[in-house]
Amino acid sequence: MKRELIPDAVLVSSYIQGDEKALAQLIQRHKQKIYSFIYSKVYDRDVTEDIFQDTFIKVIRTLKLGKYNEEGKFLPWVMRIAHNLVIDHFRKNNRMPKFDNTDEFNIFSVIRDSSMNVENRMIKSQVEEDVRRLIEELPEDQKQVLIMRMYKDMSFKEISENTGVSINTALGRMRYALINLRKVIEKHNIVLTN
């Protein structure tokens, strides 16, 4: 059987049984997807490279300890490890906003749009506070859609099903929420610093 056709699960068990080439094949097969995923979160090639390496160090450690039990779902498992390491990276660099309220928002996803590149930006505590307050002040329907989309990562179809409104209405509410956020950001001269 050609190596490309061997399922992930078979390669995983071959590696656990001592076939080092099986792991190289798995890394090669999924490298692009995992690397792109990490880069889309950190926007920095060096950091992406580090997190990618750490991801596979963790994968190897888990496999060698015999703790892998994902029933053939190798890629989602590796993606979850990468995702957790991305979060650790932001925490270590104090770039994850910390809010007092229970619904923690990821400030980067809330204010990300084509005109605001969040690469290498740090958020001052005053900005965190202002934006948190600002989100709280949005009309309930806009706030609800914004939280579902940005914080809970729901699609507009899912938002539509959850709120009982059409996809177009959900899109409209999201648009107004972002417009209102930007208006207040400009009005109060809230700036993101390098």
Image (cartoon, helix red, strand yellow):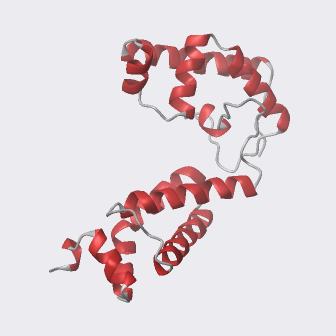
Of the pair 123 and 78, the residue shown nearer to us: 78
Measuring from the top left, give residue 40's x and y in whole percent.
Answer: 52, 51
* Horizontal relation, residue 144 to residue 37: left or right: right
Measuring from the top left, give residue 104's x and y in whole percent.
Answer: 68, 35
46 to 23, vertically: above or below: above
Q: Quadrant of residue 32?
A: bottom left
Number of numbered discs present? 0
Q: Is residue 137 visible?
A: yes
* Residue furthest left as drawn: 1
Q: Is residue 43 visible?
A: no
134 to 60, vertically: above or below: above
Q: Residue at x 19, y 72 (%)?
A: 5
Measuring from the top left, give residue 171's x and y in whole percent.
Answer: 44, 18
185 to 48, vertically: above or below: above
Of the pair 8 and 174, the residue shown nearer to us: 8
Q: Residue at x 51, y 14 (%)?
A: 173
Q: Residue at x 52, y 27 (%)?
A: 148
Q: Quadrant of residue 134?
A: top right
* Horizontal relation, residue 112 to residue 159: left or right: right
Measuring from the top left, give residue 76's x and y in whole percent.
Answer: 40, 57
